C-alpha cells in the first residue's frame, strides 16, 4: 500500500493501492457507528470507480444499521443540502475532489450539513483505529432508499437566493466546463432556469476527465481559448465534485479561483453588509473589498471546517476560500460552485458591462502557490528558520506560519490531504511574490 491519506477531513487514496473495498467498508461502518445507526445520505462525484466504492460504502453503512438515502451522482454542496433536507444524522460524499482519475475518497458530513469538524473527525479516526464498529445482527441491518431528483432542494435554495429576473433580463451567454464531474448533475439545469444561453463542456458525469481536474489556469487553457473564440459573456469551470469554481472572462482570460470569492463578496456586501470569513491562505483582495463596504473581516485557519466554525462564531454573511470555494449560509455551510455562479451572474447583470470591466475595478495582487514534497515533521523547523530570516514581518502561528508585511505576505503549512508542504505568497508585484516563494523554498529544502 503506497497511497492512502486518512485525516479528520476524510479519506483519499488510489483505487487498488490502499483504497480497497475492505477498507472502504470499514470507513463507512465507522461513519455509521459515529452516526449511531441513523439515516445517512450517500452521494458520489461520477468517477469511473464510483460505483465500486458506492457498493462498499453501502455494505459498511447497512452493516451497522443505517438507513441510507442514496442520491447517486450529485455535487458535494448538494450532499450538504440533502442532510438538512432529510434531517439525516450524517452523510458521505464519494469523491477525491481535484485528484486524478485513479483516486477516489470519502468525505463525511455531520447532521449540520457541513463536513466534520476537528472533534468529530478525531472521534471517527479513533473508532477506525480501534475498529470500534457497531455491527448489527441479520434482523437489524439497515436499508437503502433511492432519492429521486436529489438536486431539486439545492436548486431551489440557489434560485431563492438571487434576483432571477435581473439575470433573465441580461440573458448572459455562458460557457460551463463540468469536465465530466458531478457539476453536470445540476449546473446546466440551474443556468437554464436563470435564462442563460449556455454551452456545456464535459456534460456527462462519467469521471472521464477531459483535462487534469483541478480548475487552474494551466489546466483550463483549451477551455479559455474556446471562450475567446466565442461570443460568451463568461466562462465557469468546476472541479469534479463541484465545490470549487474558476472564472474566465469574455476575452478568454483566466480570472481564476482567487477572484471567484472576491467577485461574490463585491456583489453580496454591496447589498447586504456583514462580517465575512476567509482562510489564512486567501488573497488580500477580499480584505480590501470588505473594508470598501465597511464590513468586518476575519481570517480562520486553512480548511473548510475552520472557515465554517468561524463563520458561525461571527455570524458571517458569506465566506469561503481562495480555491474558488464559496460558502453561503443561506444555502449551506459547504463550499458551493452553484451559488458562486449565480451570485456572479447576478452581480454582472445588475452592474451591466463586461466581466473584464468589473474585474478591473478590483484591487490588484499577485498570489503564487508552490509546494514541496516532504514530511510534515519538518514544518516546525521551517517555521523557526522563516521567523529568523523574515524578522521584520508580523508572524501568525497555529496553521503553519503566516508572515505579514504592510503590502505582502507569505505562508508555509503542511497539507491535510497530501504529503506536501504548501508555500503561498502574495504581493502587488508578481516578482515580489515570486521572490518570497523562492526564498521560502531555499529555507525548506535543506531541512529535508
Image (cartoon, helix red, strand yellow):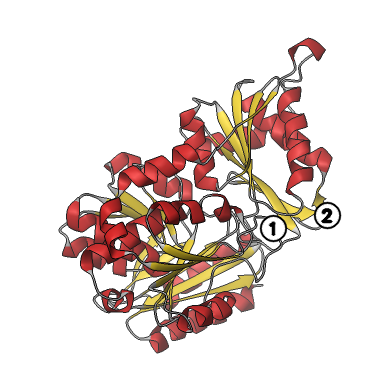
- Vertical order, 42 against 417 (above or below): above
- Which residue does the numbered mark 1 point to in the structure image? 207
- Vertical order, 136 against 175 (above or below): above
- Vertical order, 128 against 354 (above or below): above
Image quadrant in which the C terminus is located: bottom right
The image quarter containing residue 194 is: bottom left
Q: Going by the picture, which residue comes out furthest to the left?
A: 294
Task: Between residue 27 and residue 62, name the one nearer to us.
Answer: 62
From the top left corner, tell me how far across and down residue 378 is, in percent: 61, 65
- Which residue does the numbered mark 2 point to in the structure image? 17
Asked whether residue 300 is in view, the answer is no
The image quarter containing residue 291 is: bottom left
| 1 or 2: tag closer to the N-terminus | 2
Task: Between residue 315 and residue 375, name the one nearer to us.
Answer: 315
Query: Residue drawn at (50%, 73%), measured in percent from left and top?
Result: 385
Q: Residues within 10 Å of mark 1 (few under 14, many from 20)?
A: many
Q: Going by the picture, which residue comes out furthest to the top?
A: 139
Under tag 2, what secondary structure?
Answer: loop
Is residue 193 rendered to the left or right of residue 70? left
Query: Residue drawn at (45%, 37%), measured in percent from left and top?
Result: 153
The image quarter containing residue 196 is: bottom left
Under tag 1, what secondary structure?
Answer: loop
Image quadrant in which the N terminus is located: bottom right
Q: Going by the picture, which residue comes out furthest to the bottom?
A: 431
Task: Between residue 14 and residue 197, name the one nearer to us.
Answer: 197
Task: Between residue 95 and residue 202, name the one nearer to us.
Answer: 202
Is residue 241 rendered to the left or right of residue 311? right
Is residue 329 rendered to the left or right of residue 123? left
Residues at marks 1 and 2, CA–CA distance in whole angstroms: 19 Å
Amino acid at each position: 500500500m503506497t497511497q492512502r491519506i486518512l485525516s479528520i477531513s476524510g479519506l483519499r487514496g488510489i483505487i487498488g493501492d490502499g483504497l480497497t473495498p475492505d477498507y472502504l467498508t470499514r470507513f463507512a461502518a465507522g461513519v455509521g457507528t459515529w452516526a449511531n445507526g441513523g439515516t445517512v445520505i450517500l452521494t458520489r462525484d461520477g468517477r469511473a470507480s464510483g460505483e465500486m466504492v458506492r457498493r462498499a460504502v453501502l455494505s459498511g453503512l447497512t452493516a451497522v444499521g443505517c438507513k441510507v438515502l442514496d442520491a447517486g451522482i450529485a455535487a458535494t454542496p448538494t450532499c450538504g443540502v440533502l442532510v438538512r433536507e432529510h434531517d439525516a444524522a450524517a452523510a458521505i460524499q464519494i469523491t477525491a475532489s481535484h485528484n486524478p482519475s485513479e483516486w477516489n475518497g470519502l468525505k463525511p458530513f455531520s447532521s449540520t450539513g457541513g463536513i466534520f469538524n476537528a472533534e468529530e473527525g478525531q472521534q471517527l479516526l479513533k473508532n477506525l483505529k480501534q475498529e470500534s464498529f457497531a455491527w448489527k445482527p441479520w434482523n437489524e441491518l439497515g436499508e437503502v432508499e433511492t432519492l429521486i431528483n436529489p438536486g431539486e432542494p439545492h436548486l431551489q435554495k440557489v434560485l431563492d437566493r438571487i434576483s432571477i429576473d435581473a439575470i433573465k433580463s441580461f440573458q448572459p451567454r455562458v460557457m460551463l466546463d463540468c469536465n465530466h464531474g458531478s457539476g453536470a448533475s445540476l449546473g446546466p439545469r440551474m443556468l437554464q432556469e436563470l435564462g442563460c444561453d449556455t454551452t456545456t463542456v464535459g456534460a456527462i458525469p462519467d469521471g472521464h476527465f477531459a483535462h487534469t481536474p483541478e480548475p487552474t489556469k494551466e489546466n483550463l487553457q483549451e477551455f479559455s481559448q474556446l471562450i475567446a473564440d466565442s461570443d460568451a459573456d463568461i466562462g465557469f469551470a468546476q472541479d469534479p465534485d463541484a465545490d470549487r469554481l474558476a472564472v474566465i472572462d469574455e476575452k478568454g482570460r483566466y480570472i481564476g479561483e482567487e477572484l471567484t470569492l472576491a467577485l461574490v463578496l463585491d456583489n453580496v456586501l454591496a447589498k447586504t453588509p456583514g462580517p465575512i470569513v476567509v482562510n489564512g491562505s486567501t488573497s488580500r483582495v477580499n480584505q480590501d473589498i470588505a473594508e470598501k463596504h465597511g464590513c468586518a473581516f476575519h481570517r480562520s485557519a486553512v480548511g473548510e471546517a475552520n472557515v465554517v466554525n468561524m463563520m458561525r462564531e461571527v455570524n458571517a454573511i458569506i465566506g469561503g476560500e481562495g480555491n474558488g470555494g464559496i460558502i453561503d449560509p443561506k444555502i449551506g455551510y459547504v463550499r458551493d460552485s452553484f451559488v458562486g455562479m449565480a451570485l456572479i451572474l447576478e452581480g454582472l447583470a445588475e452592474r451591466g458591462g463586461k466581466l473584464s470591466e468589473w474585474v478591473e475595478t478590483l484591487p490588484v495582487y499577485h498570489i503564487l502557490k508552490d509546494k514541496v514534497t516532504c514530511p510534515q515533521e519538518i514544518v516546525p523547523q521551517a517555521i523557526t528558520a522563516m521567523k529568523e530570516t523574515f524578522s521584520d514581518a508580523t508572524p501568525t502561528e497555529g496553521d503553519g506560519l503566516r508572515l505579514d508585511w504592510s503590502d505582502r505576505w507569505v505562508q508555509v503549512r503542511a497539507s491535510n490531504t497530501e504529503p506536501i508542504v504548501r508555500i503561498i505568497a502574495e504581493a502587488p508585484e508578481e516578482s515580489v511574490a515570486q521572490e518570497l516563494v523562492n526564498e521560502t523554498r531555499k529555507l525548506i529544502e535543506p531541512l529535508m
